[in-house]
Image (cartoon, rainbow, N blue to C red):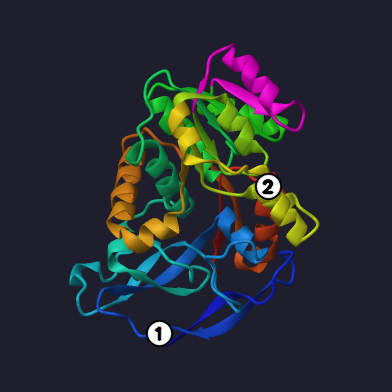
Amino acid sequence: MTTEAFVLTKYGNAEGAFQLKTIDLPSLKSNEVLIDSEGFGLNYADVMARRNMYKEAPNLPAVLGYEVVGKIIQIGSACDIALMGKRVLAFTRFGGYAKQVISNANAVLEIGNLELQIALALCTQGVTAYYMSSYISQIRPMEKVLIHAAAGGVGSLLIQMAKNNGAIVIAKVGTSEKVDAVLSMGADFAINYKTENYHERLLSILDGACLDISFNAVAGSTVKKDLASLGPGGRLFLFGGAEMLTGKFGLFSKLNFVRKMMMLLPIGLMMRSKSIIGVNMLKIADVKPEIIAICLNEVHLLYLNGKLIPSLGKQFNQESMQEAHAFLESGISQGKVAVIWD
């Protein structure tokens, strides 16, 4: 069985990194389905993988991608026959940048005629946001919540989930346009870190109070600042390392990134009653896939009940795949970025 896919053939800039090639697909396992894809979503982890900064990614040549929307055209022997022909949103553990994609039958959600880009926004990014904000640790009313990269796919959903729970939301972004965007989503305060010192501005907003939660996809130098701002019972969620991409000196930059994250002793966190929670949804999916299914269904219900409105970013066709990757990496994108097959 063969299909066409965007194959990552070299690390570095988006231009020239991917080639559209014919690839072989393995035979379906009993619990798997084959999906004829309409399109796929991009996530920042894809950029990290292209930059050779994501160790979970497969070795070159590799087909990246965590999520697709399409129609099920073949099922494994143990799958429910009712799945045949259904239009679904599906998780993929890489391999999503292909025209035909294999997914576990437990990792698909029937979506009917739901708009492709909305569905994709609810997948990896929606599940990540829900897992952090509602599954592993509930946001409580009046808790003070800082969200880094708040105009992005995960951040924009976190704003809404936090506000649904009655939190006070501080959104950190990098442009004046994004300031307007996050305020329109419901954020109580917005910080443009490109024009002001975000930590000083954060302390001013807190006005002597402590931060309860930080959702941090940046890491690096921001970890120490966020941890210092947390009060007893505070939680720091680390789910990305975007600051690593700003380094220009290879291994030295990576080591400096790690140095900025500090060496923390567990007893220090215990004595201050603070938590650091690392989040890698691939690991969760590998060990406890039922959690992914629970979170995906809950996010879908939030959308159906009008409590979650995904922020839709730019949509690209397959001829603009490399442009789409560069756009996501640029830092100017907002919401979900998707690529559509012709």
Residue nearest the viewer, comparing 68 with 14: 14
* Quarter of the image that includes the C terminus: bottom right
Using the rendered image of the protein, determine whether residue 198 is visible from the camera's viewpoint: yes
Is residue 302 depicted above or below 26 in this figure? above
- Which secondary structure, mark 2? helix
Q: Name the residue nearer the viewer: 86 or 100.
A: 100
Horizontal side, residue 223 vs residue 76: left or right: right
**Residue 46 sits in which quadrant?**
bottom right
Q: Assess whether residue 133 is covered by the magenta stretch.
A: no
Image position of 96 with respect to 183: above or below? below
From the top left corner, tell me how far across and down residue 134 is, in percent: 35, 37
Please report whichever mark, 1 or 2, sits nearer to the chain's N-terminal start.
Answer: 1
Where does the magenta region start and end?
188-212
Q: Position of residue 91 (x, y in %)?
A: 40, 61
Locate residue 44: give its quadrant.
Answer: bottom right
The disc label shown at residue 26, or none: 1
Q: How many marks?
A: 2
Residue at horizontal 41 percent and vertical 59 percent from the top: 283
x and y percent of residue 156 in the render? 52, 37
**Residue 4 in the figure: left or right of residue 133:** right
Label 1 SS: loop
- CA separation in Å, label 1 and label 2: 42 Å
- The amino acid pointed to by label 2 is Arg
Badge 1 local density, few (<14 within 10 Å), some, or many (20+)?
A: few
Q: Amino acid at mark 1?
A: Pro
320 over 165 or under it: above or below: below
* 301 w.r.t. 104: above or below: above
Q: Is residue 191 magenta?
A: yes
Looking at the image, the residue that sits furthest to the right is 249
Residue 242, horizontal then vertical, whole percent: 64, 48
User: Circle 2 is placed at which residue position?
Assistant: 259
